[in-house]
Image (cartoon, rainbow, N blue to C red):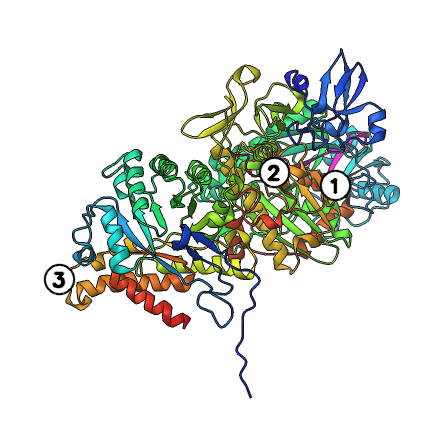
């Protein structure tokens, strides 16, 4: 065990090497060890050469395999399925067919003659009716502007792009010369308060061709939705905020087009899932009344809008579709999550939690749904944390600590040198610090410990996760007491939100048959650690599923299926919103949650804090 | 037809703890119902009153408060003895005012010596109250715990910012601690959990929820204490079942109302009576909210409170 730690190889050891937990099992493949056998090793394991690393003394050169359960799982940047199928193991919407709302049709038309001098548009519509059985198409005015030339350039062979319009009809949005069906792309965006995630999709093969995550440039105008609304009320504020987010999007589109080697003219659709404030700001709609009682939106079902008219650098024919909104703080992102995970299709009572700057939760099944939102703060996306960052390369995600000498074992996304800490890393770090007694249940460092990792920084205590020489930033990467306080506040808001919502429908957390966790605070969430810090309710672990970015998932599926596009509207209509800001229970629950895991320790029976470790 | 009074059914009880030692030990707590609801449960130990003694002569007390202690205020030992012999004190609360870094700033050794002298001179339980300055209290109370080994003191206040080292000494030398939190049920519970994690036995913890005088937000204190008792007695919250101490004398005697001379504000009535009533009514209010120990000053106020306790438990 000591050799492994010295070599920087992580082996789990919950008990800190006392031999009692059995989490440090290794397979001795070659060589000799002297070891004490405990009851944690079964006969079968012992015969096959499995030992507890902490009970082994090396007697010769060894080849050792660390058993999978003893490893710290290495993070991968994206666990999202790049190919979409309805058989994915995750809880996904079911029963839909791959049929993107944006469709391309190739038509070969007879050229006009003196005897057949029908106008160009009618000729094209007739072709579509005869060859593709498309009736009652409406036509965007802009399509006509160059139609005559395009038809002739293509020698009467053209590709027509259609899209469902705002009613139940279908409209023509673009006509191109020749057969361009092979090049048919769309964009899906999740616009978060802190970060924006985008994907470039191939609408022929249902594939993700490129994806990018970027900070929302609106951050310089405030970290949460409320400060954005305040900013929008200043002179020219609304325009500035709109430009900030469209700039972000434009940069990402350029990046993805470059990555995937796709022509920007071949992108014909864009789907956006975002919280209500983000949607209104993107559309340039004054969000003033969102934060004034009774908290009403300008629009729930946003009509189609030309992306270019908002300042997004796409061709004029690209329509932007925003997933419908529910309430001031419950937006299209949550609708997208429910859609993508198919909660609305099943009888299973599910708790859906979207962990982010704006924390949102939904409880329900195919019959009913209630939802609530709370401001958790940017902590989970690395905001308000001294060395916080979004979950990209170089972020510390995996973390464990040696219970004897308090030395850390860290794992970094993409295995680079560390740059900072992402949200899931923060959860793992705080959980490990708590379990090892480096911090107490109120999130304060136990300053009596003798380790040089623990020191007083700028007026507050901090723990050094990585020394300057080991990092990319050439500074010590630390976690401070203030960071921990911020995390405690964020997790308290999330937990109190769930508690309040669960109670408002007369159930308890234990009635939840499934808990789906969404959010992009990391590649994965360690459920055990999230429960240890009191972010998630203490339920049997097999009820939890982590789906990553539920919002982007829903946006992508909407881009792939017009069935789901319609379902999204149905879901938004089903949801009943509970306003937490007006709820006294929420405040009480929040105050009681400001502790690790919770002031009411009895609701976290599986979280055990060792006594008497502190001195 | 008989009228059946509605009764609350309780599922928990307040922890019974014994303070001090030998035959002068005092047991507090043990309630199985809300305060004075003796028609619903038991109150096996009557609330107790600890009389204040200061380690340096007070310079901002109104005349009425000083009067009963003329001649002893410069000697904590004689002061404590007077409280016992003349006023029948059940416990003594020694306030270490002189250690305040913003005042006389006396050192830990000197303070500990004073405590030792008082502890040697009396046989009833001795409460030692610091200044709530974290660094200074850590230094002073650690020393007090050490020097007074075997005296079974009650030391406080232990706050979130300084509980660790003081509690460690208290455990080592077998004293009881006062867990002090700023008028918040969650924080009160959290500190008890932290003390428990540290290894402080539950029967060695008394809670100080922070109190204030009537007219200065006592409703808020009342409400928090009431919630603590509801959680302890009806929700089996064992981390809130500790007895409660209220350091109320200094709160009521520092108010503007006890200091304005009768001539200046005749409508407020006699200044002496006023001070006594401020203290007595504040203490009675806190007893009704669930206090187990009242730290009090004026013998007349104490008398009123004792009468009230006797009537309510008759």
At a point 84% along the width and 30% down the height, the residue shown is A43
In the image, which disc is placed on residue A557?
1
Q: Name the residue under label 2.
A: A191
Residue B74, percent across and down? Answer: 19, 46
State the image coordinates of residue A119 (x, y, percent, origin top left): 78, 41
Of the 4 image quadrants, the one containing the N terminus of chain B is bottom right
From the image, which quarter does the C terminus of chain B lie in? Answer: bottom left
Q: In which quarter of the image is residue B298?
A: bottom left
Question: A555 or B43, which lies in front?
Answer: B43
Identify residue for label 3: B264
As helix, strand or loop, the secondary structure at mark 1 comes to helix
- Which mark is nearer the camera, 2 or 3? 3
Judge the density around disc 1: few (<14), some (14-19), many (≥20) Cα neighbours within 10 Å. many
Residue contact between numbered discs 1 and 2, judged by CB atoms under 8 Å:
no
The reply to whether label 1 and label 2 mark residues of one chain is yes
Give the side of residue B43 with respect to residue A36, left or right: left
Q: Is mark 3 on a helix, strand or loop?
A: loop
Q: Residues within 10 Å of mark 3 (few under 14, many from 20)?
A: few
Q: Distance between the residues labelled 2 and 3?
A: 67 Å
> Of all residues shown, which one is farthest toward the bottom?
B1
Report the span colored magenta: A174-196
Question: Residue farthest to the top?
Answer: A61
Name the chain under label 3: B
Q: Which chain carries label 1?
A: A
Membership of A439 in magenta stretch: no
Q: Quadrant of residue B136?
A: top left
Of the numbered discs in the image, which one, if any, rests on residue A341?
none
Q: How far apart are marks 3 and 1 (CA)?
A: 80 Å
Do pointers 2 and 3 mark residues of a single chain?
A: no
Q: Earlier in the sequence, mark 1 or mark 2?
A: 2
- Residue A287 visible? The answer is no
């Amino acid at each position: 065990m000591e050799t492994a730690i010295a070599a920087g190889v992580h082996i789990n050891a919950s008990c800190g090497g006392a031999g009692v937990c059995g989490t440090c099992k290794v397979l001795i493949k070659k060589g000799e060890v002297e070891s004490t056998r405990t009851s944690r090793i079964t006969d079968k394991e012992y015969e096959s050469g499995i030992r507890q690393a902490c009970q082994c003394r090396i007697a010769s050169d060894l080849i050792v395999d660390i058993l999978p359960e003893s490893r710290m799982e290495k993070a991968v940047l994206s666990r999202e399925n790049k190919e979409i199928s309805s058989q994915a193991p995750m809880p996904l919407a079911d029963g839909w067919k791959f049929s993107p709302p944006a469709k391309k049709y190739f038509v070969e038309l007879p050229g006009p003659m003196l005897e057949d001098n029908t106008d160009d548009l009618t000729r094209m519509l007739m072709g579509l009716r005869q060859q593709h059985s498309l009736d009652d198409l409406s036509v965007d005015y802009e399509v006509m502007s160059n139609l005559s030339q395009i038809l002739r350039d293509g020698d009467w062979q053209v590709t027509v792009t259609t899209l469902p319009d705002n009613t139940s009809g279908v409209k023509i949005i673009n006509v191109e010369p020749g057969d361009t069906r092979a090049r048919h792309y769309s964009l899906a965006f999740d616009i978060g308060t802190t970060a924006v995630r985008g994907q470039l999709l191939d609408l022929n093969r249902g594939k993700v061709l490129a994806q990018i995550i970027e900070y929302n440039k609106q951050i310089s105008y405030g970290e949460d939705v409320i400060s954005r609304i305040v900013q929008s009320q200043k002179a020219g504020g609304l325009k500035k905020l709109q430009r900030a987010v469209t700039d972000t999007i434009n940069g990402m589109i350029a990046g993805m087009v470059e990555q995937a080697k796709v022509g920007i003219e071949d992108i014909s659709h864009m789907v956006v899932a975002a919280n209500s404030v983000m949607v209104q700001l993107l559309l340039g709609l004054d969000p003033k009344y969102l934060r004034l009682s009774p908290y009403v939106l300008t629009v729930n079902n946003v009509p189609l809008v030309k992306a270019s008219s908002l300042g997004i650098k796409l061709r004029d024919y690209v329509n932007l579709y925003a997933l419908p909104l529910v309430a001031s703080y419950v937006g299209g992102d949550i609708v997208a999550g429910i859609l993508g995970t198919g909660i609305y299709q099943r009888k299973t009572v599910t708790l859906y939690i979207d962990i982010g700057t704006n924390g949102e939760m939904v409880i329900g099944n195919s019959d009913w749904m209630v939802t609530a939102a709370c401001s958790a703060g940017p902590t989970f996306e690395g905001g308000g944390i001294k060395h916080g960052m979004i979950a990209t390369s170089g972020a510390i995600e995996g973390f464990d600590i040696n219970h004897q000498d308090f030395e850390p074992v860290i794992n970094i996304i993409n295995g680079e040198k560390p740059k900072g800490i992402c949200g899931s890393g923060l959860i793992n770090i705080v959980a490990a610090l708590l379990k090892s007694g480096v911090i107490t249940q109120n999130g304060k460092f136990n300053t009596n410990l003798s380790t040089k990792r623990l020191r007083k920084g700028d007026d507050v205590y901090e723990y050094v996760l990585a020394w300057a020489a080991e990092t990319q930033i050439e500074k010590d990467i630390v976690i401070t007491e203030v960071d921990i306080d911020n995390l405690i506040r964020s997790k308290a808001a999330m937990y109190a939100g769930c508690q309040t919502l669960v109670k408002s429908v007369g159930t308890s957390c234990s009635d939840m048959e499934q808990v789906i966790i969404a959010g992009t605070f990391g590649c994965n969430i360690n459920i055990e650690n999230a429960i240890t810090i009191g972010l998630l309710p203490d339920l049997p672990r097999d009820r939890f599923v982590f789906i990553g970015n539920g919002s982007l998932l829903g946006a992508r599926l909407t881009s792939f299926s017009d069935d789901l596009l319609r379902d999204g509207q149905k879901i938004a209509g089903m949801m009943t919103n509970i306003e937490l800001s007006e709820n006294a229970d929420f405040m009480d629950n929040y105050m009681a949650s400001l502790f690790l895991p919770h002031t009411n320790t009895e609701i976290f029976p599986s979280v055990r804090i060792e006594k008497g470790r502190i001195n | 037809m008989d009228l059946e009074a509605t009764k609350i059914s309780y599922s928990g009880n307040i922890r019974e703890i014994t303070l001090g030692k030998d035959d002068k030990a005092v047991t507090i707590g043990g309630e199985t119902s809300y305060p004075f609801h003796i028609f619903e449960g038991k109150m096996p130990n009557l609330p107790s009153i600890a009389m204040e003694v200061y380690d340096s002569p007070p310079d901002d007390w109104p005349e009425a408060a000083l009067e009963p202690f003329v001649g002893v205020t410069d000697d904590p030992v004689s002061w404590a003895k007077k409280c016992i012999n003349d006023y029948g004190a059940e416990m003594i609360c020694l306030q270490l005012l002189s250690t305040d870094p913003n005042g006389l700033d006396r050192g830990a050794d000197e303070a500990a010596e004073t405590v030792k002298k008082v502890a040697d001179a009396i046989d009833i339980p001795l409460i030692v109250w610091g200044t709530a300055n974290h660094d200074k209290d850590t230094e002073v109370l650690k020393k007090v715990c050490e020097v007074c080994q075997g005296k079974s003191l009650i030391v406080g206040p232990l706050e979130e910012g300084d509980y660790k080292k003081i509690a460690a000494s208290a455990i080592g030398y077998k004293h009881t601690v006062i867990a002090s939190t700023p008028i918040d049920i969650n924080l009160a519970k959290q500190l008890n959990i932290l003390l428990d994690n540290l290894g402080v036995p539950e029967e060695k913890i008394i809670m100080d929820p922070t109190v204030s005088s009537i007219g200065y937000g006592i409703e808020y204190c009342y409400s928090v204490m009431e919630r603590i008792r509801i959680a302890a007695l009806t929700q089996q919250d064992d981390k809130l079942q500790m007895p409660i101490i209220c350091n109320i004398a200094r709160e009521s005697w520092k108010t503007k109302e006890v200091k304005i001379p009768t001539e200046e504000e005749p409508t407020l009535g006699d200044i002496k009576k006023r001070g006594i009533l401020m203290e007595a009514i504040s203490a009675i209010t806190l007893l009704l909210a669930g206090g187990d120990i009242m730290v009090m000053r004026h013998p007349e106020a104490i008398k009123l409170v004792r009468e009230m306790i006797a009537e309510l438990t008759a």
